[in-house]
């Protein structure tokens, strides 16, 4: 199997992707903890980034994700 056995052995491609997004979420939450006493706007941005990383695991795609793809792939606004 291309992705391997999720119960044993090496991680599958999906599990590696999940780990990457969970690390991104944890990083954003750590930054939130640092920023929440100093700058509420920056702290809120870190929470948004953490939610976005989790959304990439669960399959929740928000408006910002769609706009990012449009601006990145179609050079709209450049």
Image (cartoon, rainbow, N blue to C red):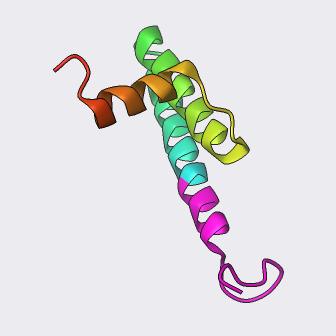
The structure residue drawn at horizontal position 38% and vertical position 28%, both measured from the top left corner, is 70
The location of residue 25, given as percent across then percent down, is 57, 42
Q: Quick check: is 40 in the magenta stretch?
A: no
The structure residue drawn at horizontal position 51% and vertical position 30%, both measured from the top left corner, is 49
- Give, as a single range, the part of the protein colored magenta: 1-20
Q: Which is more toward the observer, 43 or 77?
A: 77
Is residue 7 placed above or below 49 in the rendered structure? below
Tell which residue pokes out farthest to the right in this image: 7
Is residue 53 placed above or below 43 in the rendered structure? below
Residue 36 visible somewhere in the drawing: no
Going by the image, does 77 lie left or right of 71? left
Going by the image, does 65 lie left or right of 72? right
The structure residue drawn at horizontal position 51% and vertical position 16%, both measured from the top left corner, is 44
The location of residue 35, given as percent across then percent down, is 44, 23
The location of residue 51, given as percent across then percent down, is 61, 31
Residue 58 visible somewhere in the drawing: yes
Q: Quick check: is 9 in the magenta stretch?
A: yes
Tell which residue pokes out farthest to the front in this image: 74
Instruction: For the C terminus, give its image quadrant.
Output: top left
Going by the image, does 5 lie left or right of 62? right
Q: Which is more toward the observer, 40 or 5?
A: 5
Q: How many marks?
A: 0
């Amino acid at each position: 199997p291309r992705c391997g056995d999720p119960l044993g052995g090496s991680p599958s491609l999906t599990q590696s992707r999940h780990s990457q997004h969970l690390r991104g979420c944890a990083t954003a939450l750590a930054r939130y903890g640092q920023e929440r006493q100093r700058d509420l706007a920056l702290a809120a941005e870190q929470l948004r980034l953490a939610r976005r990383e989790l959304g990439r695991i669960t399959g929740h795609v928000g408006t910002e994700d769609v706009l990012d793809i449009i601006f990145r792939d179609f050079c709209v606004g450049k």
